[in-house]
Each structure stands twice: as structure tokens, then as C-alpha cells.
């Protein structure tokens, strides 16, 4: 019976050859979203691959994205059980790694209200303003009289990490001035966590590799997670002892007192780790891509600045409350996320039952990859898709399923509001505070590099000079 039903299945087309055991793993050249895009040009907007013992389906059109996350949203709301979810995801109990079901639904509900809601984000507005101000001040020191050469990547990374850690625990851990032992220790742990989380682990597709712990991956995970867990537990215990703070940990601990079954220490640690992994680099790379694209289009940078000056005037610094009036800036962010989505393949989904996509049979347990990068460059949907044209959004805002940098449906990104605030405020402040130009005549290189969130291959270097508004604000500080 099993054999006969299998034979009747109509799976999406698949490239040849599929090697014995490996399946199509040999076809995967980085960056994967480009390889999948090329395959979709030959095989169509839905195709299937075999990775070891796992069937994967890749979707590359907005019509199919819509079908996945409306009609099939529940069935596709599961996540594959990757090795990273076992160790870094606290045995699949974090928001991003948990399987779809009551546990995940509760966690998502509490995180939406207690962590990501506008009311909670508003409490931390002053942290975001302070972090952006520190960034401006650092740039100002080397560039207040004349154009100075700057590299933004580390500064943006510092900003996004400090922003999350201050929301979470009230302390800065990144930057030269945070050179105490705890800062150093935490930065070293985070570096390792990001490294292991980014490893392409064969154990995800070949159970055999897990049994023999090929290349010692599991040992590495265990050792780094012991350190990370001890650090996070230390933070929680510290906040439990000293209750006079207004951080996210304090808030979650106060909820723990009334609902200990939901707000366990593991849940709190899981929320912190997910915020660090999902909410730092993603925002930092988006700002770096936006600045790179603007440096290649100085007239658009000028247009954004004119809008900011017009809304804010020439004396004060832009703040979050101004963002809703900065329409063109918003279009720049949408256009950046279209061309350079920080997670070009979203986060893998898995079908919890048999379903159909695009008329094809998708068996239970199939891994679904959504090639948002390809959807965003589909010439059927987007006019002149590879050009950076924020103006395309002036006709009206475009959202899912055509523009899906944050995904769509139940498992879409809960941090979108925070990301928009951080990216919007930082970008507006950089544009308002400085004149910018490229280091030479050559256009900024826009090649994509390797990493969990799609970074630029070459970190952006640019020249900037402080504008009058910063002289007024910072002159006494120098
Ligand atoms: C530009 C910034 C960001 C981008 C482009 C982005 C994008 C995404 C995408 C594509 C997904 C997966 C959607 C899917 O599975 O279909 C996701 C999931 C997630 N993101 Fe973000 N994200 C960003 C910022 C943030 C921030 C700031 C946070 C929190 C501090 C965050 C927290 C999460 C979490 C917890 C999930 C997992 C949700 C779940 O599985 O239920 N993200 N994000």
C-alpha cells in the first residue's frame, strides 16, 4: 500500500543528477539563494531537492508564497529539527526553533505582548536614541572638520548588540569603553555562538554523522552552550537579587512570580538568545546595505536628506517619533530589504502533514525553503527588478506576498517593529548628521558575502563629514 501511494505522488520537478546518499547536496554552492534562483530559472518557481534523507522544496514566486502562508499556513508552520535547535535553541523550546503547537503558540503570544509590542518597545526608546547618539559621536570625533574615512560594520554591530543587551539586562557589553572582564567574556561567547550557529552541519541531513559526531560538532555545541547558559543564568540571578531595575529580564521575572509555569528561567534565557541571534546582525547588515546603495545613488541620498531637513528643521536631531513622517526614508528601507533581504531564504519551515503547493504533492516532513531573494527580483512582479529605486514604492506600499523580508503568516518575524525602529532611526541619523561620499570614483561593491544574515562581502568603507546640526549638538562634547 505504501509503495502504491508513493508512486502516485506528483512531486515538484527536481534537478539531475541526484547522487546516491548525498542527493543534491553537491549542487549547493554559496550563496545558496543564487544557486536556487538559477535552478528555478530551469525548473520553475517550485522544485524539489534531496539532501541526504530529507526532501526539500524551494519556492520562488509570490503566488506560491501566498499559497504557502495562507491556505497551507498551519501545515507549514513547523520547523525542521536541526542540530542548532537542540543546543542553542534549548532543546527546541525557543521561539524560532519550537515545533508548531500549543507550546509555541503560548510562547509567541507572550513574546508578542511582553517583548515586541509597541508599548514594551516604547519603554526602551531612550536606549535606542542613546545608542544612535553614541554612534554619531564616534563618527563625529574623526570627521567634524573634514571628510574622514570610516568603516561602519563594527560600529553598527556594536549598536545593535548594545541595544538588545540594554533592553534585556540594562548593560552595554560591546565597544572599546566596555572593556571590563564581563564584557570581554560575553563578547567571546557571542562570537562562538554565532560561529557554531552558522556552520553547515551535515548532521542535519545524515543521522549517521550525528551518531559518530562527525568533526565534533555536537561537542562544540555542548561546550559553547554551557558557557552561554551559565552567563545568561548569572544575569537572571543578578536581576532576581536586585529588583530595582526596569529591564526586560526584570519584567519577565515579575511575570514569573504570578505565572511560574510559563515564565521559567529557560523560557527567559531562550528569549534572550533568540533576540541576540535574530535581532542584531539582521538590522546591522540592513543599515550597511542601505548606506551602500545610497552611496551608489547620491541623488537618492540627497532626496532623503531633504525630506529629513524638511520634517525636523536644521537644529534638532531626528528621533523615533519623526519616523512616521519620513516616507521616502521608509521607501529606501523597503527597497533595501527587497534587494538585500537579511535572511534571503527566510528560516526553513517543515510540513507537519501532506499538503499541496502549486498543484504538486508535498509529503509530511518536507523542508520548505522560500527564496525571498528571488521573489523580490521576479521580473513578472517588479519592473526593472535589479535596480535600486525607492520611488517604486511611491505608487503605494507593497507587502507580502510580493515583499517578504520578514516572512509571512504565523511564523513571520515578530521583531519587525523593533527592526524598523532601529534601522529607521540609525539610517535617518546618519543621513541627517553627515555628508557622505564614496572613498573613490568606483561604485561601492555590492557582492553578497557568507554569514547567517546576508552580509556584504566587503565591509562598507566611506567618507563622511559632520553637518552643522551635529556641530551644534556635539561641539561642547569635544
Ligand atoms: C531587518 C531585520 C530583520 C529581518 C530581515 C528579519 C527577518 C526574519 C525572517 C525572514 C524570519 C523567518 C520568517 C519565517 O520563518 O517565515 C524571522 C523570524 C524571527 N525573527 Fe526576525 N528579522 C529581523 C529582525 C528581528 C529582530 C530585531 C528580532 C528580535 C529582537 C527578530 C526576531 C525573530 C524571531 C524570534 C523569529 C522566529 C519567529 C518564529 O519562528 O516564530 N527579528 N525574522
Image (cartoon, helix red, strand yellow):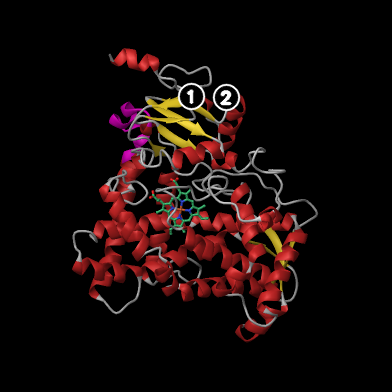
Residue occupying image coordinates x 20% and y 64%: 259
Q: Earlier in the sequence, mark 1 or mark 2?
A: 1
Q: Nearer the viewer, residue 287 or 255?
A: 255
Q: Is residue 228 visible?
A: no
Q: Secondary structure at mark 1?
A: loop
Q: How many marks?
A: 2
Query: With 366 as the anchor, is 443 left or right in this view?
Result: right
Q: Secondary structure at mark 2?
A: helix
Q: Could you tell me which quadrant the C terminus lies in? A: bottom right
Using the image, tell me which numbered label, if any, was put on residue 43.
2
Q: Is residue 99 visible?
A: yes
Q: Could you tell me which quadrant the N terminus lies in? A: top left
Query: With 276 as the anchor, is 147 left or right in this view?
Result: right
Spot occupied by residue 373 in the image (x, y as percentages of width and height):
58, 42
- Magenta-colored span: 205-218
Using the image, tell me which numbered label, if any, was put on residue 12.
1
Q: Is the CB of mark 1 within 8 Å of ligand 1?
A: no
Spot occupied by residue 83 in the image (x, y as percentages of width and height):
34, 39
Q: Is residue 451 above or below residue 306?
A: above
Amino acid at each position: 500500500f505504501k509503495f502504491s501511494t508513493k508512486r502516485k505522488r506528483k512531486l515538484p520537478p527536481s534537478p539531475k543528477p541526484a547522487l546516491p546518499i548525498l542527493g543534491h547536496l553537491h549542487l549547493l554552492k554559496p550563496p545558496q539563494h543564487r544557486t536556487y534562483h538559477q535552478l528555478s530559472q530551469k525548473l520553475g518557481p517550485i522544485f524539489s531537492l534531496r539532501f541526504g534523507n530529507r526532501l526539500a522544496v524551494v519556492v520562488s514566486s509570490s503566488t506560491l508564497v501566498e499559497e504557502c502562508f495562507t491556505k497551507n499556513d498551519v501545515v507549514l508552520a513547523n520547523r525542521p529539527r536541526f542540530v542548532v535547535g537542540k543546543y542553542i535553541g534549548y532543546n527546541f523550546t525557543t521561539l524560532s526553533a519550537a515545533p508548531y503547537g500549543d507550546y509555541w503558540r503560548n510562547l509567541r503570544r507572550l513574546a508578542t505582548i511582553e517583548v515586541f509590542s509597541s508599548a514594551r518597545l516604547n519603554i526602551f526608546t531612550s536606549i535606542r536614541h542613546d545608542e544612535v547618539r553614541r554612534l554619531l559621536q564616534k563618527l563625529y570625533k574623526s570627521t567634524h572638520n573634514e571628510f574622514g574615512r570610516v568603516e561602519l560594520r563594527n560600529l553598527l554591530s556594536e549598536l545593535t548588540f548594545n541595544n538588545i543587551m540594554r533592553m534585556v539586562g540594562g548593560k552595554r557589553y560591546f565597544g572599546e569603553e566596555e572593556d571590563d572582564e564581563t564584557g570581554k567574556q560575553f563578547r567571546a561567547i557571542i562570537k562562538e555562538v554565532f560561529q557554531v550557529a552558522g556552520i553547515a552541519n551535515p548532521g542535519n541531513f545524515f543521522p549517521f554523522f550525528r551518531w559518530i559526531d562527525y568533526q565534533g560538532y555536537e561537542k562544540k555545541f555542548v561546550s559553547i552552550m554551557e558557557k552561554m547558559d551559565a552567563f545568561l543564568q548569572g544575569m537572571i540571578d543578578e536581576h532576581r537579587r536586585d529588583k530595582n531595575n526596569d529591564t526586560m529580564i526584570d519584567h519577565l521575572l515579575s511575570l514569573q512570580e504570578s505565572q511560574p509555569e510559563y515564565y521559567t528561567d529557560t523560557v527567559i534565557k531562550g528569549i534572550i538568545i533568540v533576540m541576540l541571534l535574530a535581532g542584531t546582525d539582521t538590522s546591522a547588515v540592513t543599515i550597511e546595505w542601505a548606506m551602500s546603495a545610497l552611496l551608489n545613488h547620491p541623488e537618492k541620498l540627497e532626496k532623503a536628506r531633504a525630506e529629513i531637513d524638511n520634517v525636523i528643521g536644521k537644529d534638532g536631531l531626528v528621533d523615533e517619533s519623526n519616523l512616521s513622517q519620513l516616507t521616502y526614508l521608509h521607501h529606501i528601507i523597503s527597497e533595501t530589504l527587497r534587494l538585500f533581504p537579511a535572511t534571503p531564504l527566510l528560516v526553513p519551515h517543515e510540513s507537519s502533514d501532506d499538503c499541496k503547493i502549486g498543484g504538486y504533492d508535498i509529503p509530511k516532513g518536507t523542508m520548505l525553503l522560500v527564496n525571498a531573494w528571488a521573489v523580490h527580483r521576479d521580473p513578472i512582479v517588479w519592473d526593472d527588478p535589479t535596480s535600486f529605486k525607492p520611488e517604486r514604492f511611491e505608487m503605494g506600499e507593497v507587502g507580502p506576498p510580493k515583499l517578504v523580508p520578514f516572512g509571512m503568516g504565523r511564523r513571520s518575524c515578530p521583531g519587525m517593529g523593533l527592526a524598523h525602529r532601529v534601522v529607521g532611526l540609525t539610517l535617518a541619523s546618519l543621513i541627517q548628521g553627515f555628508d557622505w561620499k564614496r572613498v573613490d570614483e568606483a561604485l561601492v561593491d555590492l557582492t553578497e558575502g557568507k554569514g547567517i544574515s546576508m552580509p556584504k562581502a566587503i565591509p562598507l568603507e566611506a567618507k563622511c563629514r559632520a553637518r552643522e546640526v551635529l556641530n551644534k549638538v556635539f561641539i561642547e562634547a569635544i
